[in-house]
Amino acid sequence: MPIINRIADFHAEMTEWRHRLHANPETAFEEHKTSEFVAERLTSFGISVERGIAGTGVVGTLRGSVPGPCAIALRADMDALPIAEQNGFAHASQHQGRMHACGHDGHTAMLLGAAKHLAETRNFAGTIHFIFQPAEENEGGARAMIEDGVLERYPVEAVFGMHNWPELPVGRFAIQPGAMMAAFDIFEVTIKGRGGHAAMPHLAVDPIVAAAQVVNGLQTIASRNTHPLESAVVSITQIHGGDTWNVIPETVVLRGTTRSFSPEIRDHMEPAIRRIADGACRSCGAEMELCYELCYERRYPPTLNAVEETEIAAAAAAAIVGEGNVQRMLLPSMGAEDFAFFLEKKPGAYIWIGNGTAETGGMLHSPHYDFNDAILPLGASYWVRLAETALAKESVSASLR
Ligand code: NI
């Protein structure tokens, strides 16, 4: 595999960075030490740095050896998860209840490695903005950086992102135009009845039975209301109600998430949940005493790759691992990714890099997960080739629209 030789030279250094980040995980918008570390490294490479974008976001800016009209953004995420790590190795989390269980420590180390190399060689025309973003998990750090004006202050023609993928073997990449990851929304249904004695249910209005009907009814959104060739997920992930054996409670709270790709199906989710909750309450309620409230919140849009940038990214990956190791057709994930917010604003491409850890239990968000240090030079080499292709000196503006 033609990993860039100079990058192979600092594999050990990237591993050291990665272990340091892994041992000191920080969750959404609290990445103070992490962003400080990133800024220090970028500065030491001679890259100009702005800190404090959306709180803890960092942007490093590097100009090529020849001027060019184009600029691109390469983005890594920096945040950890509220998970108690179960690994026992030396670089395991030192922060109780927080863990780099999604490999963002590795993403940060790979982009730093690429930045170091690109700063040494500057073998491109134009400008690279290295975006290190906070709060990819749940809280939309990408959206926060955009709202803080990052794309106005650092205008770019294209944006690129990368995530490790445990199911893919080491030495492989996967990417396709169009959908890579799903839209992610959350909802809460509160069902209110009238509490009472469990032995005298006819004197109460039971929200638990209605809640059970809602849980079952929600299963029909994907199975009965969505075109069989489209994709939709509705998962209830929390049920809260009742405190003891012999009391029918007043309220039950259900919480969950929906996933979808097409805007039409996404738009269909909230009214469908409302219809099912309404129907359950009508069928169980005595004289309309049973009622519900629905809060539905749109979180992340789907992650949709642009055609031209996907081609540039796939070619850069192929230059590192060979065409046969770049999977160009895949089943998109129903997981979500807030890089989608950048892709809503700018054309770009998001790629998966094989982490090769699925078989040993190292799934994303597992307390046993660990980023695979073997892929650090692969990812850093990919970033370098991508930047050198997208901002090729020979065809200054031809490779990007
Ligand atoms: Ni992640």
Image (cartoon, rainbow, N blue to C red):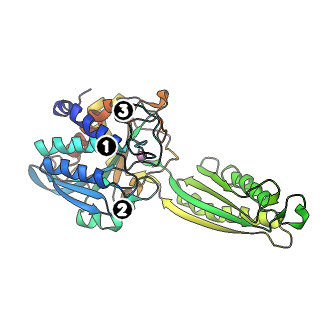
Q: Position of residue 290 (x, y in %)?
A: 79, 69
Badge 3 is on which residue?
A: 372
User: Visible in this render: residue 345?
Assistant: yes
For mark 2, give the secondary structure.
Answer: helix
328 left or right, relative to 277: left
User: Residue 295 or 99: which is nearer the viewer?
Assistant: 99
For mark 3, give the secondary structure.
Answer: loop
In the rendered image, the quadrant that contains the N terminus is top left
Task: Locate residue 68: give its quadrant.
Answer: bottom left
For mark 1, give the secondary structure.
Answer: helix
User: Visible in this render: residue 226?
Assistant: no
What is the number of the mark on residue 21? 1
Badge 2 is on which residue?
A: 345
Task: Locate residue 52: give its quadrant.
Answer: bottom left
Residue at horizontal 17%, vertical 43%? 116
Q: Position of residue 185 (x, y in %)?
A: 54, 58
The amino acid beneath tag 2 is Lys
Dot in front, 3 or 2: 3
First along the sequence among labels 3 and 1: 1
Tell me the CA gap for discs 3 and 1.
14 Å
Residue at horizontal 30%, vertical 30%? 321
The amino acid beneath tag 1 is Leu
